[in-house]
Image (cartoon, rainbow, N blue to C red):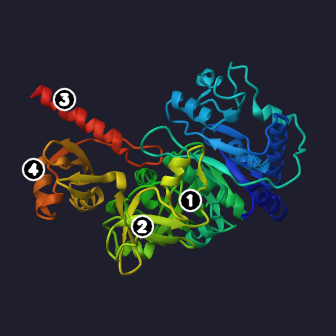
Amino acid sequence: MPMTFLKALRLNAKRFPKKDAVVFKGQPQSYAAFQDRVERMMTVLHGQRIAPGDKVAIIAENHPDFLAAYIAITGLDAIPAPVNYRIKPEIMAEVVRRADSALLLLDETVLEHAGLFRDAVPGMLVLGERAGNTGLPLLADMIAATPPDPPPGEGGTTIMLHTSGTTGVPKGALRSRYGMEERAIEQGFRPDDRMLCALPICLSAGCAYTLLPLYLGGTVYLMERFEAEEALRLITTERITATMLLPAMLQRLTEVPGFDDADLSSVRTLQSGAGEIFPDLKAKILARFGDALNIYAASTEAGPYANLRAADLRAHMTGNCVGRPFFGVELKLLDDDLNEVPLGEVGEICTRSESRFDCYYKENELTNETRRGDYVTVGDLGRMDENGLLWFAGRKRDIIKSGGINIYAGDIEELLINHSGIAEAHCIGLPDPHWTELICAVIVPAPGASLSEEDVITYAEARLERYKRPRRVVFMESVPRNLTGRVLKGELKEQVLAQLHLQEDRG
């Protein structure tokens, strides 16, 4: 059994009572003070009749009390159910309802929509400093008025982490395992870390990598939301030793005035993932952070399954190499008949580890679709090379079926991105009466580049097999992404079709 979050906090509060546990907007809370707040919150929630197995929804930006809620709710052996605060309010309410939430904690980000949730949940408390004119109780006031008297026990570890996926209403993925020790060993996190936590903690990666330093006994420098200038300031002035930043965050960090001259020598671990980092950005980050950079592959359901360290990254700057199987992860590449594919061939990435999820809440059929025996898959595809490195080949839903042949969008994207005038390349299948689907390349040009459709097609024709060549090229300034930075291929396809129809109407 993994150590619970409450037990880890209590042990670390004994080890480091005066050490900063959480620093937020320059205000620190020691481990002793943070434990006291968590136990007061537990007492308040117990008084609200939150019992083992109950789900408590949370809709909020990053805040120390949001982080405390994870530990307090699991300490009662109840289940936090965070919801992405950037999705449409109507979908938020549906997610809260589907989770069978017994209570909702919400902050000022969504207070104006509080009425939407009244039919979705029995009770609501406001998390943060202000309740506005809603008339709802402020959790902070209740904590201040309540001495710590939590029920006995160390609680559990289960959190309902809603998928940030690219289609449909987010699914509630119940997870009781996070592989904290495996993450520390593989990625180099330590108890003496001062860790910058800027990812939304309502999402899987933000949750895991913000709880991780508290689990180990480190210090969390929590940002309400990512701001590149402030992140760079914290790294340099607070001598940050570790952080987890998504590719889009890294890009914005490199664009901050002073980045090239900033003292970044304190950073020992810079973890990234949740999307491909293109070669130019890799080079910039390696030049400034050196061997601190790791890029990992993961999903809400499987947890982390591969990690690319700086030494391997330098040898594979182009292409979507995601590294070696993660420490403690058993990884297989299977074909549709559940046989392992030969070395170098594409197969479905299936893993077994101490980070895999338990199930989708009340979705047995969908859960079964992710199972390959005792292994888990979300439809990611990859190939293994002779050096033990895993190369991401796309997702099953990204396969373009053209002329009776399955074509991996990632193979084409990997080739196109090497063009100096292309900043991003994303391939989709468009309906076609002759080919079933034709390959369309969606191109985001590099700054200052002048590209035509003919330029892209000519470049592809010289380098790709005939059946893999794009037949249409569409240029866009940006592509739709979710909160973690993943491209929303479904929305992208809709936008492309609308753009093409508009051109046809004008023509």
Tell me which numbered mark, 4 or 3, is placed earlier along the sequence.
Answer: 4
Residue corresponding to mark 4: 454
- Could you tell me how far apart the alpha carbons at marks 1 and 3 are, in whole angstroms? 44 Å
Viewer-proximal residue among 485 and 20 = 485
Viewer-proximal residue among 104 and 279 = 104
The image quadrant that residue 322 belongs to is bottom left
- Could you tell me how far apart the alpha carbons at marks 2 and 1 are, in whole angstroms? 37 Å
Which three-letter amino acid code belongs to the residue tagged 3?
Answer: Leu
Q: Is residue 204 left or right of residue 144?
A: left
- Could you tell me how far apart the alpha carbons at marks 4 and 2 are, in whole angstroms? 41 Å
Are discs 1 and 3 less than 8 Å apart at CB?
Answer: no
x, y percent for residue 457: 12, 53
Query: Which mark's residue is nearer the viewer, 4 or 1?
Result: 4
Are discs 4 and 3 less than 8 Å apart at CB?
Answer: no
Tell me which numbered mark, 3 or 2, is placed earlier along the sequence.
Answer: 2
x, y percent for residue 504: 13, 30
Query: Which mark's residue is nearer the viewer, 2 or 1?
Result: 2
Q: Residues within 10 Å of mark 1 (few under 14, many from 20)?
A: many
Q: Residues within 10 Å of mark 2 (few under 14, many from 20)?
A: some
Tell me which numbered mark, 4 or 2, is placed earlier along the sequence.
Answer: 2
x, y percent for residue 369: 48, 53
> In the rendered image, which quarter contains the N terminus?
bottom right
Are discs 4 and 1 less than 8 Å apart at CB?
Answer: no
> In the rendered image, which quarter contains the C terminus?
top left
Which three-letter amino acid code belongs to the residue tagged 4?
Answer: Glu
Residue corresponding to mark 3: 502
Residue corresponding to mark 1: 243
Viewer-proximal residue among 401 and 298 = 401
Picture layout, residue 354 above or below residue 106: below
Residue 338 - label: 2
The local secondary structure at tag 1 comes to strand
